[in-house]
Image (cartoon, coloured by chain):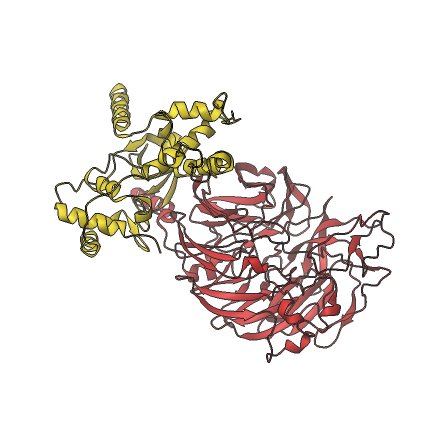
Chain colours: A red, B yellow
């Protein structure tokens, strides 16, 4: 009996070492194997919720660093690692895939990819992580390739050109796996591209379908662009998607229209920029869309990851999509139909004064020659960093910015510090609307917990600096976050109280994830040029 | 007992040294070291020597050709202290960094030699598929990853080298392909390809193709073992050997 028990224990411990391939069923039900982290945000609902319970609000104060892995890279470290049965996979920016032992942080293998010199993304030679299906990892590259890599050996299996880097396309996001396909969007929308989302056969790398985020002649929505502006209208896609198996819809957010800050050359709503797209996962056909910011002139990318949640909505269960947008507004959409259920500013926001019945915002602030103070500023109320949702607390955890800026057309800088364009930021040669931070409002980062029913926040934790970090929430009711000032924080998911902090000595530009090996729960965060893992003693 | 084990270990190590054509510096090489060495070479040495190491007359670093024979120690010294009165400067590199460059160059040179008798690649494929090659080697998406991947071996190895690998497989094992064995304190033995090791831990791709990491404190024994690849000198006819070599030479990736 005792012997049998010991044998059973040994078998359970040994099981992860000989686990099966990562099937799509495993990815879809990632919550059934909380020891692993099989996609960018944990599951395809993008809740970034870890069901692990060893680390709790009561004991998180005892967390200790287990290991550090130093990337041989000075680029921003934005990747969320994957963990499959004790092996961790991440990306050393720009495009080296690395396999590590998740217990010790020691390296198994490195696949070094050298992107073509034309691969020059506007805003950093970064990568947000890998995807896995079967025994194969998938990585998008800054020169807009998609590469399949053998997870055991680190050997490349195929390398497909998704778009031309010389045409200013790039890929920085983690691919999204749906069934036997690898789906990825093209970034570069701060330049004159025409964005698209493509699905590739996971085995061969052959393109199966493509959806252009800007409709061509004859397609619905094409008339929302004046002249030939649709050809170079941006609407890049540079973050991961979500998937709902019940409707077989895959959801992606799209980026700003180009040029970013002057819409006079592209009159109209500019569909499908700054939108969420619901596409049939098998065919890429558009089922519904919702545009958050029609005719955007403020660079309000909607490339946040869609967060899917099943919540009580006005007394009834409803399948919704939660969206904390860069434009300062938080949304609840019905994810089956795309119906606009609610929208409300979640930081100080003044560019709109409400919505019509269908959820179209009424814009009231425009850049002028004299300069217009607009909230939020170009950096947005949040950016790409992924938020989290806890089915336990029912709260939506978002790392936000409070900030404002003055937007002025044609190089006017009223109120700016004297001197030649001292406060101007340029991004893309075609942009002529400059902006600057308002000197009287210091931008800050705030981690907040929102109630989806009211879109009011229950608690907030104010950071001393802005944040490009996302949030992770665990079933131990702990929220992990951090910001540019280089502290990795554990907050009480119910109250926002600070429970623990670690000085990671470098900017946090990524969200945390959690996994376990041999019954020990870890929390990992990329910060500075390194990856840190923490656990209880 | 303990003494005997140590003696056996020493003899094993000595035996390996006999097989290995390189000196002590090469003993630590892993695939990661070679990658580090390649990057350091490209960032530093290639500025004058060129990406293939053959820009300077009389020197072809990529093929192990120097103006006079060089030991690993000679190369280490030159990388670190330079050559006086020549454009070859001293560097700030540590011994370990320089060793990785030497390892990279030696490994590269080892892959760039000679050629052999003709065979029939189709017949060779038949011999390959019928045998047990795929239980260790991978071609495309088929076979094990524990032994060297042969998908593009024709671009990396000459026919002469392929033949040598078949008849005398332990003669020249590339550093990244060496077989390592650990014995846990409970007696469990795990063998596989050595991916990395440090003061406290060892990383392997084990014979079941699992990525494994071991704490050295949990190990009773550890070390390189002879390659599990058998010699086909007598078990294949000369024609079969030539056919298999011809097939392997035809493997040029996808």
- A140 left or right of B187 in image: right
Residue that sits furthest to the top in the current view: B3
Tell me if I can see residue A517 in this picture. Answer: yes
Work out whether residue B215 can be spotted: no
Q: Is residue B42 above or below residue A476?
A: above
Pinpoint residue A79: horizontal percent, then vertical percent. Answer: 55, 49
Q: Residue at x 62, y 70 (%)?
A: A231
Q: Vertically, is A56 above or below A434?
A: above
Q: Position of residue A176 (x, y in %)?
A: 51, 61
Count the numbered circles shown: 0
Q: Up-down: is B127 above or below B61? A: below
**Residue farthest along the front direction in this orientation:** B57
Can you give x and y, in whole percent of width and height, for residue B36 in the image? Answer: 46, 37
Instruction: Return the x and y of residue A476 as percentages of the image width and height.
Output: 57, 49
Give the answer, above or below, for where B117 lies relative to A352.
Answer: above
At x 39%, y 49%, the residue is: A155
Q: Residue at x 28, y 34 (%)?
A: B187
């Amino acid at each position: 009996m005792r012997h049998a028990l010991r044998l059973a224990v040994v078998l359970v411990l040994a099981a992860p070492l000989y686990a099966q391939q990562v099937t799509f069923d495993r990815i879809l039900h990632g919550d059934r194997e909380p020891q692993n982290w099989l996609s960018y945000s944990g599951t395809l609902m993008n809740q970034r919720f870890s069901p692990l319970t060893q680390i709790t609000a009561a004991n998180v104060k005892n967390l200790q660093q287990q290991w550090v892995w130093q990337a041989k890279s000075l680029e921003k470290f934005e990747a969320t690692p994957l963990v499959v049965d004790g092996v961790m996979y991440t990306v050393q920016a720009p495009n080296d895939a690395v396999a590590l032992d998740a217990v010790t942080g020691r390296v198994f293998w490195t696949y070094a990819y050298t992107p073509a010199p034309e691969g020059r993304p506007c805003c950093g030679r970064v990568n947000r992580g890998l995807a896995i299906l079967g025994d194969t990892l998938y990585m998008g590259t800054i020169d807009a390739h998609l590469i399949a890599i053998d997870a055991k050996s680190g050997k490349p299996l195929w390398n497909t050109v998704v778009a031309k880097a010389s045409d200013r396309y790039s890929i920085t996001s983690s691919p999204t796996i749906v069934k036997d396909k690898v789906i990825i969007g093209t970034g570069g929308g701060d330049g004159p591209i025409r964005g698209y989302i493509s699905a590739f056969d996971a085995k061969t790398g052959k393109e199966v379908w493509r959806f252009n985020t800007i409709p061509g002649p004859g397609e619905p929505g094409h008339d929302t662009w004046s002249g030939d502006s649709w050809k170079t209208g941006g609407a890049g896609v540079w973050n991961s998607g979500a998937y709902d198996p019940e409707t077989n819809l895959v959801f992606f957010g799209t980026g700003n229209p180009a040029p970013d800050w002057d819409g006079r050359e592209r009159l109209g709503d500019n569909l499908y920029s700054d939108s969420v797209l619901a596409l049939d996962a098998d065919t890429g056909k558009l089922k519904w869309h919702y545009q958050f910011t029609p005719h955007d002139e403020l660079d309000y990318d909607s490339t946040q990851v869609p967060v899917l949640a099943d919540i009580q909505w006005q007394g009834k269960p409803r399948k919704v999509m939660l969206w904390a947008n860069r434009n300062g507004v938080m949304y609840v959409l019905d994810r089956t139909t795309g119906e606009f259920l609610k929208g409300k500013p979640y930081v100080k926001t003044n560019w709109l004064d409400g919505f019509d019945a269908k959820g179209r915002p009424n814009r009231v602030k425009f850049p002028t020659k004299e300069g217009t103070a607009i909230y939020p500023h170009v950096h947005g109320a949040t950016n790409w960093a992924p938020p989290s949702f806890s089915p336990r607390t029912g709260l939506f955890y978002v790392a936000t910015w409070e900030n404002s800026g003055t937007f002025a057309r044609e190089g006017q800088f009223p109120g700016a510090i004297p001197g030649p364009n001292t406060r101007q930021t340029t991004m893309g040669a075609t942009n002529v609307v400059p902006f600057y931070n308002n000197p009287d409002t210091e931008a800050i980062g705030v981690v907040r917990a929102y109630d989806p029913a009211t879109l009011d926040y229950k608690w907030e934790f104010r950071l001393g600096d802005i944040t490009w970090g996302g949030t992770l929430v665990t079933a131990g009711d702990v929220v992990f976050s951090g910001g540019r000032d280089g502290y990795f924080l554990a907050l009480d998911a119910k109250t926002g109280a600070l429970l623990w902090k670690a000085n990671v000595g470098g900017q946090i530009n990524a969200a945390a994830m959690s996994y376990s090996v041999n019954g020990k729960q870890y929390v990992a965060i990329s910060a500075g040029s390194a990856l840190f893992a923490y656990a209880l003693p | 007992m303990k003494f005997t084990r140590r003696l056996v270990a020493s003899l094993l190590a000595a035996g390996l040294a006999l097989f290995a054509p390189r000196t002590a510096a090469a003993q630590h090489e892993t695939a990661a070291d070679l990658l580090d060495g390649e990057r350091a070479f490209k960032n530093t040495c290639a500025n004058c020597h060129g990406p293939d190491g053959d820009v300077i007359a009389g020197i072809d670093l990529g093929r192990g050709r120097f103006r006079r024979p060089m030991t690993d120690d000679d190369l280490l010294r030159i990388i670190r202290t330079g050559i006086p009165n020549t454009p070859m400067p001293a560097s700030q590199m540590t011994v370990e960094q320089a060793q990785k460059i030497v390892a990279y160059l030696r490994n590269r040179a080892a892959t760039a030699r000679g050629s052999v008798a003709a065979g029939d690649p189709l017949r060779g494929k038949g011999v390959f598929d019928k045998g047990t090659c795929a239980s260790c080697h991978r071609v495309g998406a088929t076979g094990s990853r524990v032994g060297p991947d042969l998908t593009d071996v024709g671009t990396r190895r000459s026919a002469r080298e392929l033949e040598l690998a078949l008849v005398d497989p332990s003669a020249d094992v590339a550093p990244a392909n060496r077989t390592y064995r650990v014995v846990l304190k409970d007696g469990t033995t795990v063998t596989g390809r050595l991916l990395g090791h440090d003061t406290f831990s060892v990383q392997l791709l084990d014979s079941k193709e699992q990525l494994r990491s071991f704490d050295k404190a949990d190990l009773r024994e550890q070390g390189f073992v002879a390659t599990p690849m058998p010699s086909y000198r007598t078990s294949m006819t000369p024609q079969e050997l030539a056919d298999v070599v011809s097939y392997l030479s035809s493997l040029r990736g996808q």
